[in-house]
Amino acid sequence: MYTSVLGGLLVVVVLGATSLWVLQDARSRVQLHRPVVATFGGLTVERPEVWAALCLLLVVLFLPLYLVARSAQ
């Protein structure tokens, strides 16, 4: 049981750290006038806070999308 709690805590820490990195990176790119923008299904994502929230909720989908959109600029 202790191992499963530790594993769950590790997942939460990694998700939080990843989302904070996305937030910081996206904000720094906005300051450089090079925002990370992606459009899919008629929805455009460009705000750093939205990128971070999406990565926190669905990291498997939105972190790769963020990295691709980031490198396309």
Image (spheres, rainbow, N blue to C red):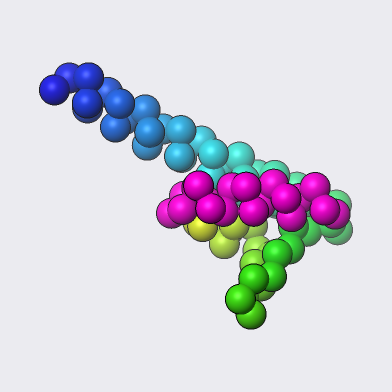
Q: Give the range drawn in magenta.
A: 55-73
Q: In which quarter of the image is residue 48?
A: bottom right
What residue lies at 64% left-to-right and 53% top-to-bottom? 65
**Quadrant position of the N terminus in the picture:** top left
Looking at the image, residue 7 sits to the left or right of residue 34; the answer is left
39 vs 6, nearest the viewer: 39
Give residue 47's position: percent from left, percent from top: 65, 63
Give residue 25's position: percent from left, percent from top: 70, 44
**Residue 59 shows in the view:** yes
Looking at the image, residue 35 sits to the left or right of residue 66; the answer is right
What residue lies at 45% left-to-right and 39% top-to-bottom? 15
Q: Among all residues in the image, which is located at the extreme top?
A: 3
In the rendered view, tell whether residue 5 sits above or below residue 55. Answer: above
72 vs 30, nearest the viewer: 72
**Residue 31 shows in the view:** no
**Quadrant position of the C terminus in the picture:** bottom right
Q: Quadrant of residue 41?
A: bottom right
Looking at the image, residue 72 sits to the left or right of residue 52; the answer is right
In the rendered view, tell whether residue 30 sits above or below residue 43. Answer: above
What residue lies at 22% left-to-right and 26% top-to-bottom? 4
Q: How many labels does the image show?
A: 0
73 vs 33, nearest the viewer: 73
Give residue 61's position: percent from left, percent from top: 53, 53
Looking at the image, residue 10 sits to the left or right of residue 37; the answer is left
Give residue 58's position: percent from left, percent from top: 46, 53
Q: Among all residues in the image, which is located at the extreme bottom?
A: 42
Q: Does the magenta stretch include residue 46?
A: no
What residue lies at 30% left-to-right and 26% top-to-bottom? 7
Q: Does the magenta stretch include residue 68?
A: yes
